[in-house]
Image (tube, rainbow, N blue to C red):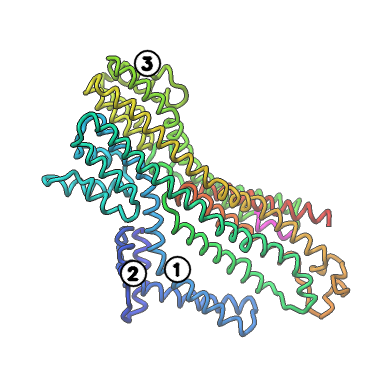
């Protein structure tokens, strides 16, 4: 939780001076996310924001000319909804962060296991696992390691007990790592292998269970949040002929407020039940390959918006330019903003791609008596892709700067200095330790390669299991939903919903109205209302599909939304034009 948000909540909380009741769960969630406000302040702020939302809902309902009986219902629904959302937001945020943190559990156990292979000391293994990453799980372990200094134990046991309720497999794996330090040499390797098996199997079982549970809710989102609302658009002409007062205000309330809010609530429910996530590497804005020029995104978005609106004004109906301009501008701005971060992450993933082969080759040669420095240089010539180039760069740094293996990878000008990959950086650190151990460390490096292969297979399998669901959501957001929406709007216009079509309508009335005397609903109003819904659908479903596969990472979500918005609005407008020609 940022300082600005804490200031806003504090200011809002002052508007409700009466005593409030809080829960221990809310306090624990705020502590976990590092909030600078207490639970009572959040509860008070929720009441104030709910009251403001109720007033705003009343004003909007009056502007949209809703019926007098609907206005208080809209105000009450918005007020209660906003109040509840503020009160549960810290818990949802804490749950999302725990999920992302537990995604690092296999890697954390793997780093501890690999360190134990080189030197069987639980204290050093715990410190190494904590120091080679900066995620929430590693920071928590670092705190336990600090508290364990000067006392019996390595910190692994207390850390495992703290997170054991969230992830029992992590507790079992870390206790096995701790026990491996005192195991006989002949049993130590098997104990460490069991630790890796425990955490990988536990993660895979949790993800398999979640993938089975998510099928029903995802189908419900697809049916009631996308398919049914879009199908009802074509029924509007018949509804108006039957005398149902379908107005623009009602459509805005249903399609652009109620349905997106329901989709957001369903998405939050699914996020809260996701057991683990595998977030991409964190890339700071200070990275040399990430330009710190926000104006580039603004200029790119503005240019794309103006160009898209101008083109829509030429080839599409006159009501489309504002919709196309806003969606195109927002999407391109997000792409320009977050594409450099995605490029850095792609490079980091490419470096990790052949790391298993490189480690195996280095380990085999070290076992045969070759120095780690020479083994790294020879592996660079045998491994393809970014991994081979990284090892070649490290070998070059060794020769040019006369430094050891670890500094050649992680030094100021090292091969991994600007690569945000905890897995690769931890591997480089262990290569440095192996250079001090000599030939006995060769077997440890080979085991390291096997464990890294297991971790990569685990992430790949878990994402593949969710791909069926998330792929459907993503395609619905960008292609299927906008395509059906555009065709449905064109069909509704062709059936006589717009007086300008010249059609008699279903009830046989003239172009100026229906048989019941209800004025016709212009196609422009319907098209804009449904178009806004399509854009909101593209955002919400893209966030949901991306978050389920990778976790709620800001840059990754921004990049995918930046792609989805322009695609969705182009498909929607193109579908309106194409279907209008046919109808």
- Does residue 399 show up? no
Left or right of 277 on screen, residue 3: left
Depth-wise, is mark 2 or mark 1 nearer the camera? 1
Q: Which of marks 2 and 1 is nearer the N terminus?
A: 2
* 357 versus 544 height, above or below: above
Q: Give the x, y percent position of residue 506.
A: 84, 71
Residue 427 lies in what quarter of the image? Answer: top left
Q: Which residue is drawn at 79% across and 68% down?
A: 497
Left or right of 516 on screen, residue 534: left
Q: Give the x, y percent position of residue 396.
A: 35, 19
**Residues rendered magenta in the picture:** 318-324
From the image, tell me which residue sits under label 2: 10
Q: Describe the element under mark 1 as helix, strand or loop.
A: helix
User: Residue 142 versus residue 182: which sits nearer the camera?
Assistant: 182
For this orientation, the residue located farthest to the bottom is 68
Left or right of 417 on screen, residue 188: left
- Does residue 78 show up? yes
User: Alpha-carbon distance for marks 2 and 1?
Assistant: 17 Å
User: Alpha-carbon distance for marks 3 and 2?
Assistant: 60 Å
* 201 versus 53 height, above or below: above
* 228 versus 539 height, above or below: below
From the image, tell me which residue sits under label 1: 85
Name the quarter where the N terminus is drawn: bottom left
From the image, tell me which residue sits under label 3: 378
């Amino acid at each position: 939780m940022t300082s600005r948000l804490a200031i806003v909540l504090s200011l809002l909380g002052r508007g409700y001076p009466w005593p409030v009741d809080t829960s221990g769960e809310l306090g624990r969630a705020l502590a976990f996310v590092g909030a600078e406000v207490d639970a009572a302040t959040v509860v008070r702020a929720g009441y104030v924001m709910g009251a403001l939302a109720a007033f705003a809902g009343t004003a909007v309902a009056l502007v949209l000319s809703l019926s007098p009986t609907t206005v208080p219902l809209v105000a009450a629904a918005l007020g209660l909804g906003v109040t509840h959302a503020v009160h549960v937001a810290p818990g949802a945020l804490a749950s999302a962060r725990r999920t992302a943190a537990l995604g690092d559990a296999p890697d954390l156990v793997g780093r501890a296991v690999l360190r134990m292979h080189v030197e069987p000391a639980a204290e050093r293994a715990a410190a190494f696992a904590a120091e080679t990453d900066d995620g929430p799980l590693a920071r928590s372990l670092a705190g336990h390691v600090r508290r364990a200094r000067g006392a019996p134990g390595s910190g692994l046991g207390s850390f495992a007990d703290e997170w054991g309720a969230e992830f029992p497999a992590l507790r079992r794996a870390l206790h096995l790592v701790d026990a491996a330090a005192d195991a006989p040499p002949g049993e130590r390797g098997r104990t460490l292998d069991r630790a890796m098996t425990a955490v990988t199997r536990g993660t895979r079982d949790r993800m398999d269970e979640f993938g089975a549970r998510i099928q029903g809710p995802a189908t419900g989102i697809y049916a009631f949040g996308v398919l049914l609302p879009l199908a009802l658009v074509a029924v509007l002409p018949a509804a108006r002929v039957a005398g149902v007062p379908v107005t623009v205000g009602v459509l805005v309330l249903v399609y652009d407020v109620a349905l997106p809010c329901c989709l957001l609530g369903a998405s939050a429910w699914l996020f809260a039940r996701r057991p683990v996530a595998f977030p991409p590497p964190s890339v700071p804005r200070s990275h040399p390959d990430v330009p710190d020029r926000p104006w580039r995104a603004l200029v790119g978005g503005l240019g794309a918006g103006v160009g898209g609106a101008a083109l829509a004004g030429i080839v599409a109906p006159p009501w489309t330019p504002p919709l196309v301009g806003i969606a195109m501008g927002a999407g391109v701005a997000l792409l320009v903003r977050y594409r450099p971060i995605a490029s850095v992450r792609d490079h980091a993933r490419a470096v990790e791609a052949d790391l298993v082969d490189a480690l195996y080759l280095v380990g085999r040669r070290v076992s045969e008596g070759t120095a780690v420095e020479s083994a790294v240089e020879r592996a660079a010539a045998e491994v393809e892709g970014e991994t081979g180039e990284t090892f070649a760069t490290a070998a070059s740094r060794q020769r040019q700067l006369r430094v050891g293996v670890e500094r050649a990878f992680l030094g100021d000008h090292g091969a991994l200095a600007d690569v945000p990959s905890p897995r690769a950086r931890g591997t480089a650190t262990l290569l440095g330790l192996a250079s001090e151990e000599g030939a006995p460390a060769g077997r440890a490096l080979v085991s390291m390669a096997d464990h890294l292969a297991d971790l990569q297979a685990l992430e790949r399998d878990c994402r593949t299991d969710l791909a069926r669901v998330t792929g459907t959501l993503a395609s619905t957001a960008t292609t299927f939903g906008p395509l059906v929406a555009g065709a449905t709007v064109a069909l509704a216009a062709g059936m006589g919903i717009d007086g300008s079509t010249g059609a008699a309508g279903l009830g046989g009335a003239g172009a100026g109205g229906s048989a019941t005397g209800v004025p016709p609903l212009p196609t422009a109003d319907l098209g804009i209302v449904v178009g806004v819904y399509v854009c909101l659908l593209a955002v919400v479903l893209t966030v949901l599909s991306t978050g389920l596969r990778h976790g709620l990472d800001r840059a990754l979500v921004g990049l995918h939304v930046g792609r989805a918005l322009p695609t969705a609005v182009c498909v929607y407008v193109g579908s309106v034009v194409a279907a209008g020609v046919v109808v």
